[in-house]
């Protein structure tokens, strides 16, 4: 009996301990229930303030000349700031021993560790902020960076989407765009382009220049309003005098190609109509030793004589064969 009673006590002790702990947890939950309810209310109020703040900010920025991506970013940053403040306030209410100073210190240490762990992500994030606040590069601009060229399709907080002329999509991290030279080909609505045109040495330079000028100015893709067509005699080439022909047209790549096509065709047609030669390369052959022209002629004569002799022998044979045939028939 005594052993049985001791066994019951051994079984009752863990149960009593567990029940005591559950009772303490329940009492603790009842004690912090008001604080928990207030913290939940603070979070709900944070959600309301965040949504209301984003709505007001969107209405305020609706008439501003800002990129849609930048407007969305500012709204997200406002919401993030409100939520951080709301979480800190709820944590202080729920845990009275936790002070805002200790939370800020903890966030500072945590941010350093996170910064080292996610260096590239934060670098692209900050680069995205700078790019979004820039006014030079816009959606729809044709740019070139790091041998990648295309139209800016979308700008996010971390990366920029570039649509190439063949339809392929290139995603470039914002840090690369920020740290490397960036060429914006459509920054202006007009862009200058150049071709090289050559005429023969026997042609008049001034006349050729005027013919080329009139041909270029006749193209409808060439902008002549305040943008003069410039033609300069550039160099003495191997078989031509080269002109540098420069004019202004649209800044898009398709505008450049279309205008060059028209200008090349118009210049070729105008030079042909004016009788001005567009030369092709001439080639001069130089021999180390002089050639014997007389020897070549004597050799040609010997070949012709040999051919005549062979032809004469053939005629005599045909004659003898004909005589024999006549005798046999007689």
Image (cartoon, rainbow, N blue to C red):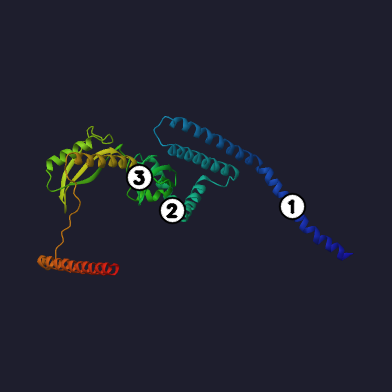
Q: Give me the C-alpha separation between circle 2 and circle 3.
A: 23 Å
Give the residue at x 54% y 43%. 88
Left or right, 17 with reference to 107: right
| Residue located 35% across and 52% down the image | 147
Disc 3 to disc 1: CB gap under 8 Å:
no
**Front in this rendered view, residue 131 or 308:** 308
Element carrying mark 3: strand
Horizontal and vertical percent for residue 2?
Answer: 87, 65
**Residue at 24% of width from left, 39% of height from top?**
266
Cα gap from disc 2 to disc 1, whole angstroms: 51 Å
Q: Secondary structure at mark 2?
A: helix
Q: Tell me the crowding category of disc 1: few under 14, some 14 to 19, or many 20 or more residues within 10 angstroms, Cα based.
A: few
Q: Which mark is residue 120?
A: 2
Residue farthest along the right direction in this orientation: 1
Q: Earlier in the sequence, mark 2 or mark 3?
A: 2
Label number found at residue 20: 1
Q: Position of residue 66 (x, y in %)?
A: 40, 35
Q: Is 200 situated above or below 289?
A: above
> In the image, which disc is placed on residue 143?
3
User: In the current view of this chain or complex, which residue is farthest to the front?
Assistant: 330
Which circle, 2 or 3, is nearer the viewer?
3
| Circles 2 and 3 in contact, beta carbons < 8 Å | no
The residue carrying pointer 2 sits among few (fewer than 14), some (14 to 19) or many (20 or more) residues within 10 Å by Cα, namely some
Q: Earlier in the sequence, mark 3 or mark 1?
A: 1
Residue 240 lies, in percent from the top left, at 16, 50
10 Å crowding of disc 3: few (<14), some (14-19), many (20+):
many
Q: Secondary structure at mark 1?
A: helix
The nearer-to-camera label among 3 and 1 is: 3
């Amino acid at each position: 009996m005594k052993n049985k009673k001791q066994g019951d006590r051994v079984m009752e002790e863990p149960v009593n301990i567990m029940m005591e702990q559950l009772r303490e947890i329940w009492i603790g939950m009842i004690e912090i229930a008001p604080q928990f309810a207030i913290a939940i209310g603070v979070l709900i109020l944070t959600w309301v303030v965040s949504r209301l703040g984003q709505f007001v900010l969107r209405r305020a920025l609706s008439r501003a000349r800002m990129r849609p991506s930048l407007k969305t970013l500012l709204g997200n940053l406002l919401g993030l700031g409100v939520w951080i403040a709301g979480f800190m306030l709820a944590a202080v209410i729920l845990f009275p021993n936790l002070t805002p100073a200790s939370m800020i210190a903890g966030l500072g240490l945590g941010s350093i560790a996170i910064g080292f762990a996610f260096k590239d992500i934060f670098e692209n994030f900050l680069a995205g902020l700078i790019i979004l606040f820039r006014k030079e590069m816009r959606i729809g601009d044709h740019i070139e960076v790091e041998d990648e060229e295309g139209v800016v399709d979308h700008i996010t907080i971390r990366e920029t989407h570039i649509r190439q002329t063949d339809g392929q999509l290139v995603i470039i991290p914002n840090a690369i765009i920020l740290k490397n030279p960036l060429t914006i080909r459509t920054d202006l609505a007009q862009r200058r382009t150049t071709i090289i045109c050559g005429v023969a040495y026997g042609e008049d330079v001034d006349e050729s220049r005027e013919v080329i000028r009139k041909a270029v100015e006749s193209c409808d893709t060439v902008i002549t309003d305040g943008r003069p067509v410039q033609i300069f005699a550039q160099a003495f080439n191997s078989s031509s005098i080269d002109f540098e022909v420069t004019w202004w047209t649209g800044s898009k790549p398709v505008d450049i190609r279309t205008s060059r096509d028209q200008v090349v065709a118009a210049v070729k047609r105008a030079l042909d109509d004016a009788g001005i030669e567009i030369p092709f390369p001439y080639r001069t052959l130089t021999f180390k030793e002089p050639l014997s022209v007389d020897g070549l002629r004597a050799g040609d004569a010997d070949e012709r004589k040999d051919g005549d002799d062979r032809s004469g022998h053939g005629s005599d044979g045909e004659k003898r064969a004909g005589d024999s045939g006549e005798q046999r028939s007689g």
